[in-house]
Image (cartoon, rainbow, N blue to C red):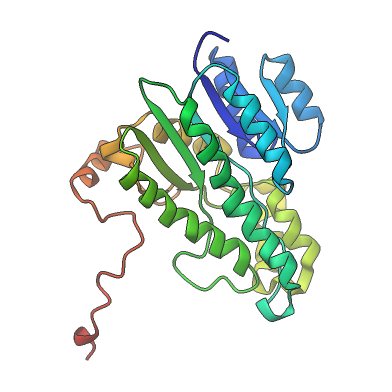
């Protein structure tokens, strides 16, 4: 493979698939990982994607995938689209081994991949994109493992940006998108709390209330192609941030915006 690769971890996920198809149609070189062979994998391969099996729950599988990707040509973008919400339920009602397992899949194994692939990044420009989720602004009852994993990724993006200055790291909250991740909520039923009814409502009429997948993909493209000064170390919302406007350039001189901060929580301002 002569041109730098665009790597997508969990390429057969809804967002991963949509992003890969856009890139393949544009003639980009795409390599992706999948856990379960599916019709989506077949479609991606027919379009020219190079697919590798990788089970994030299996440490050896992750190591093997890292080695296989490193044997390819260098990569210029790395998108980590893997994630699941289970276990769904209040913390004390969850099996702790399942809870711990979720942290591993949603957080540490993704960083394992980044750690292993950094030696083979493009010498020109490389960019890494993670995905955040709900819970950064409130307590998402019944989704503690998923929420903590995503918050940890948000902070890790900032740390990686500070330590690795020749690569752009960013993270995106895609908003309410129609994806398979919501199956865990439907399966959990009342254990998901108020989010169970909300999920049913959002998925009605083929997800017409959800944020458009096309917008999410366009935002991913924008983040992966933007300068480190503008997006590096930051947590973006596809829904709420003006990434489609030139006004977004105003954030590049503020090192604190779109990051986890305690600024503003001044006890002495309480009346």
Q: Residue at x 65, y 68 (%)?
A: 195
Residue 166 image point, x, y percent: 32, 32
Assign the C terminus to one quadrant of the image. bottom left
Residue 65 image point, x, y percent: 67, 32
Assign the N terminus to one quadrant of the image. top right
Task: Work out which residue is located at the far bottom of the displayed protein and give it.
Answer: 271
Q: Nearer the viewer, residue 262 or 166?
A: 166
Q: Nearer the viewer, residue 14 or 37?
A: 37
Task: Name the quadrant containing residue 101.
Answer: bottom right
- Residue 138 lies left or right of residue 83; in this view the side is left
Q: Residue at x 60, y 74 (%)?
A: 141
**Residue 159 visible to an observer of this rendering:** yes
**Residue 209 visible to an observer of this rendering:** no
Task: Work out which residue is located at the far top of the displayed protein and give it.
Answer: 2
Residue 107 image point, x, y percent: 57, 53
Q: Nearer the viewer, residue 190 or 230?
A: 230
Q: Residue at x 50, y 37 (%)?
A: 215
Residue 136 image point, x, y percent: 46, 64
- Residue 176 lies left or right of residue 251; in this view the side is right
Q: Residue at x 51, y 52 (%)?
A: 132
- Total numbered labels: 0
């Amino acid at each position: 493979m002569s041109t730098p690769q665009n790597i997508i971890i969990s390429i057969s996920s809804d967002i991963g698939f949509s992003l890969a198809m856009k890139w393949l149609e544009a003639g980009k070189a795409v390599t992706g990982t999948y856990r379960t062979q599916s019709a989506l994998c077949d479609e991606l391969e027919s379009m020219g994607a190079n697919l590798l099996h990788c089970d994030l729950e299996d440490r050896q599988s992750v190591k093997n995938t890292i080695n296989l990707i490193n044997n390819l040509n260098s990569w210029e973008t790395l998108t980590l689209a893997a994630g699941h919400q289970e276990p769904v339920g209040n913390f004390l009602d969850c099996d702790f081994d399942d809870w711990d397992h979720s942290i591993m899949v949603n957080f540490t194994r993704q960083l394992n991949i980044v750690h292993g692939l950094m030696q083979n990044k493009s010498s020109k420009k490389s960019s890494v994109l993670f995905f955040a989720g709900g819970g950064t602004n409130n307590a998402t009852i019944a989704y503690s493992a998923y929420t903590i994993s995503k918050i940890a990724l948000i902070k890790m993006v900032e740390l990686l940006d500070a330590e690795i200055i020749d690569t752009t790291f960013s993270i995106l909250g895609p908003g309410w998108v129609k994806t398979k991740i919501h199956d865990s909520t439907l399966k959990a039923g009342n254990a998901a709390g108020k989010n169970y009814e909300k999920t049913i409502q959002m998925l009605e009429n083929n997800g017409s209330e959800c944020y458009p997948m096309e917008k999410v993909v366009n935002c991913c493209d924008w983040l992966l192609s933007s300068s480190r000064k503008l997006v590096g170390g930051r947590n973006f919302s596809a829904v709420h941030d003006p990434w489609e406007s030139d006004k977004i350039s105003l954030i590049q001189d503020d090192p604190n915006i779109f990051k986890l901060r305690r600024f503003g929580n001044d006890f002495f301002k309480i009346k």
